[in-house]
């Protein structure tokens, strides 16, 4: 079995596409991980901002969480409508493009793509933060652990969306059961103790208050806590990943994500106040995450603690999977519209967009490296893209329902318009708060990156528009000069490569010129020029005359600077001047390396020459590569298709 087959799996046929799609059971782990895992770092991000309030900081988490849950409820209703109205991939990009124009749609796509990259980085760094909370000796290896997890998630997603959902199902449902059970147990203890339970392991003492409560501080905490909502849009962006009826499965998955996330956020907020839990500095060796402190306070450091922390670690690390599902699908839509290289639109061997997956992994890896895998350093960049996409999506849906109302009066459409308009106002307000609160902390990086990426997309679009314009044929088809082309064969020695190229050239045209470049290896090496002339005169020319066919000419040209490209281009130009209107073909003999280790043993001049001739050869020039391999060809290794599924 080849290594690629072992890591990624066998190649899937187009007919197997539907089998790789998901139901809600696989959809919750595959697409919902980001939303569920954000319950681990959203409250902690808010508590980190409230840290200057000392012990009072945890008291303010509940009202801030309530505000977050209200926005979450509006997003749930809005995206429920979006899935029904646009049951396709793309979500915000599709909605904004259709209702607000191409630029708005592209802005939504840009914001989402950046947010997906940050989702991968933040989720993995938070997961490793949970690991180092439980095993402090691993703290110095934070970045290396982050990059290892990123590599594992990348390989799993290259195997296919459904397989990723199945693989992540156990840690996802274990996370829901263990953390949900722990919170329920903690809430029960708190109720029995009148709101002041005795912790099994007390949380570290909060620092002395250094600030008083201000509106600005609460707004900043709200902005950081909004990171808990960044996965809500994922379902609407990946509706195409679900089996038919896709809308039903997408609605069920969205509802499951929002309900579970809401319960977890509410439980964390109540217990953080009851057990006096605050955020700690992740860069310090004694760091304990908020959930680690809560788990210790509720259940101690026994089996329940380690099971819960293990599931949190797995879900946080694997929360990157949401981005790995939606980012390539979004890239595919953007590429099909001409704003990304067309390779992004091509499905890979497992019917997933492999190019998008690899680019996402590279971008997230660079981000993790730049910020040393520390969650607190990444959080200020986070949520801006998501809330910009939220706002554009809700605004687009409001325009969609407004058009429906204008065409036909309907109370249902009017109610949907009110819902989406309210959602647009709420998310726009939240975006303004997030941007203002986080700007100097690092949000300016995201704010600067969005227009830069947007300009890059438009530049790619202009290139493709220019290319398509140049490729378009407006005049009627004419055959041109019907004579066979003049064929030129760059030849170094008379060997099997040259012989095979000559046979190919003679089948193409009676006018063949063998072009030998001398002194390619330096001024003191003739490279068998005389030997080649004698072989041509005594062997090749008589053989063709015996068949009453014109013999190919041998032309020997000096290579003054030891390069092939310039002498061959000059010879082509002279041939074209002497034969105006004639087509010219260059037949290049090339050695085909059978193994990767052969690559550094050869100069690969033939491939470089092909590229130069293709760019600089001018009109009416064809370039033909005639390969020869040291080993017998094995076409079955490439041509044999995988067996069709039974």
Image (tube, rainbow, N blue to C red):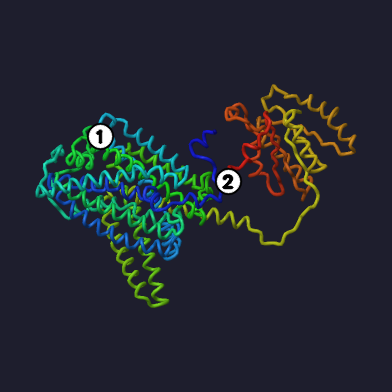
Residue 603 on image: x %, y %: 62, 30
Q: Nearer the viewer, residue 496 or 481?
A: 496
Q: Secondary structure at mark 2?
A: loop
- How crowded pointer 1 is (Cα within 10 Å; few <14, some 14-19, many 20+) is rated as many
Q: Is residue 498 above or below residue 126?
A: above
Q: Nearer the viewer, residue 249 or 437?
A: 249
Q: Is residue 93 left or right of residue 300?
A: right
Q: Is residue 596 left or right of residue 87?
A: right
Residue 188 on image: x %, y %: 16, 48
Q: Nearer the viewer, residue 280 or 526?
A: 280
- Disc sitting over residue 134 in the figure: 1
Instruction: Name the quadrant containing residue 249.
Output: bottom left
- How crowded pointer 2 is (Cα within 10 Å; few <14, some 14-19, many 20+) is rated as few
Identify the residue at horizontal 45%, vertical 47% (top origin). 161
Q: Is residue 616 left or right of residue 364?
A: right
Q: Nearer the viewer, residue 466 or 596?
A: 596
N-terminal of the pair, mark 2 or mark 1, is: 1
- Disc sitting over residue 644 in the figure: 2
Identify the residue at horizontal 28%, vertical 46% (top origin). 177
Residue 548 on image: x %, y %: 90, 38
Residue 459 is at least partly visible in this image: no
User: Which residue ends up furthest to the front in the rendered image?
Assistant: 646
Q: How many numbered marks have been drawn onto this rendered protein structure?
A: 2
User: Which residue ends up furthest to the top in the rendered image?
Assistant: 524
- Disc sitting over residue 325 in the figure: none
Q: Are marks 2 and 1 in contact (CB under 8 Å)?
A: no
Residue 410 is at least partly visible in this image: yes
Q: Quadrant of the N terminus?
A: top right
Residue 68 on image: x %, y %: 25, 56
């Amino acid at each position: 079995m080849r290594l690629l087959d072992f890591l990624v799996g066998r190649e899937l046929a187009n007919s197997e596409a539907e089998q790789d799609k998901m139901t809600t059971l696989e959809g919750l782990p595959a697409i919902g991980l980001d939303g569920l895992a954000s319950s681990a770092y959203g409250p902690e991000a808010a508590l980190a901002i409230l840290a200057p309030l000392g012990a009072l900081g945890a008291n303010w988490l509940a009202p801030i969480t309530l505000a977050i849950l209200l926005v979450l409820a509006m997003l749930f209703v809005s995206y429920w409508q979006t899935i029904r109205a646009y049951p396709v991939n793309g979500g915000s990009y599709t909605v904004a493009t259709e209702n607000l124009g191409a630029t708005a749609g592209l802005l939504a796509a840009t914001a989402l793509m950046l947010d997906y990259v940050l989702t991968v980085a933040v989720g993995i760094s938070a997961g490793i933060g949970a690991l180092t909370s439980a095993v402090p000796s691993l703290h110095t290896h934070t970045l290396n652990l982050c990059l290892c997890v990123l590599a594992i998630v990348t390989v799993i997603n290259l195997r296919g969306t459904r397989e990723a959902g199945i693989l992540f199902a156990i840690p996802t449902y274990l996370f829901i059961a263990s953390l949900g059970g722990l919170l329920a147990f903690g809430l029960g203890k708190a109720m029995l103790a009148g709101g002041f339970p005795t912790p099994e392991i007390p949380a570290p003492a909060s620092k002395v208050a250094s600030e008083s409560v201000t509106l600005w501080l609460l707004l900043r905490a709200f902005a950081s806590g909004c990171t808990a909502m960044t996965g809500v849009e994922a379902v609407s962006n990946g509706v195409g990943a679900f089996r038919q009826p896709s809308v039903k499965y997408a609605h069920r998955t969205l509802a499951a994500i929002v309900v579970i996330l809401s319960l977890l956020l509410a439980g964390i907020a109540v217990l953080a106040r009851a057990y006096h839990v605050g955020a700690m500095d992740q860069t310090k060796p004694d760091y304990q995450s908020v959930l680690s402190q809560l788990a210790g306070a509720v259940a101690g450091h026994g089996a329940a603690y380690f099971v819960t922390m293990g599931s949190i670690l797995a879900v946080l690390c694997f929360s990157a999977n949401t981005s790995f599902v939606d980012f390539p699908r979004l890239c595919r839509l953007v590429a099909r519209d001409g704003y990304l290289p067309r390779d992004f639109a091509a499905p890979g061997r497992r019917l997933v967009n492999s190019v998008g997956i690899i680019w996402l992994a590279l971008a997230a890896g660079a981000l993790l490296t730049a910020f040393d895998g520390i969650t607190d350093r990444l959080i200020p960049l986070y949520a801006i893209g998501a809330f910009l996409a939220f706002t554009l999506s809700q605004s687009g849906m409001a325009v969609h329902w407004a058009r429906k109302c204008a065409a036909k009066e309907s109370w249902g459409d009017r109610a949907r318009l009110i819902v989406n308009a309210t959602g647009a106002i709420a998310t726009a307000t939240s975006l303004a708060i997030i941007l203002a609160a986080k700007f100097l902390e690092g949000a300016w990086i995201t704010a600067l990156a969005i227009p830069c990426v947007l300009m890059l997309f438009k530049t790619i679009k202009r290139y493709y528009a220019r290319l398509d314009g140049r490729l378009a044929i407006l005049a009627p088809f004419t055959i041109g000069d019907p004579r066979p082309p003049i064929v030129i064969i760059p030849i170094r020695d008379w060997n099997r490569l040259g012989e095979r190229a000559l046979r190919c050239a003679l089948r193409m045209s009676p006018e063949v010129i063998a072009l030998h470049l001398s002194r390619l290896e330096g001024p003191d090496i003739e490279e068998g020029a005389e030997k080649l002339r004698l072989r041509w005169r005594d062997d090749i020319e008589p053989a063709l005359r015996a068949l009453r066919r014109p013999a190919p000419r041998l032309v020997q040209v000096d290579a003054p600077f030891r390069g092939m490209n310039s002498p061959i281009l000059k010879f082509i130009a002279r041939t074209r001047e002497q034969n105006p209107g004639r087509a010219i073909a260059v037949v290049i003999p090339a050695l085909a390396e059978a193994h990767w280790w052969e690559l550094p043993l050869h100069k690969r001049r033939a491939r470089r020459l092909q590229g130069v001739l293709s760019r600089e050869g001018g009109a009416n020039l064809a370039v033909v590569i005639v390969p020869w391999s040291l080993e017998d060809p094995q076409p079955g290794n490439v041509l044999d298709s995988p067996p069709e599924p039974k």
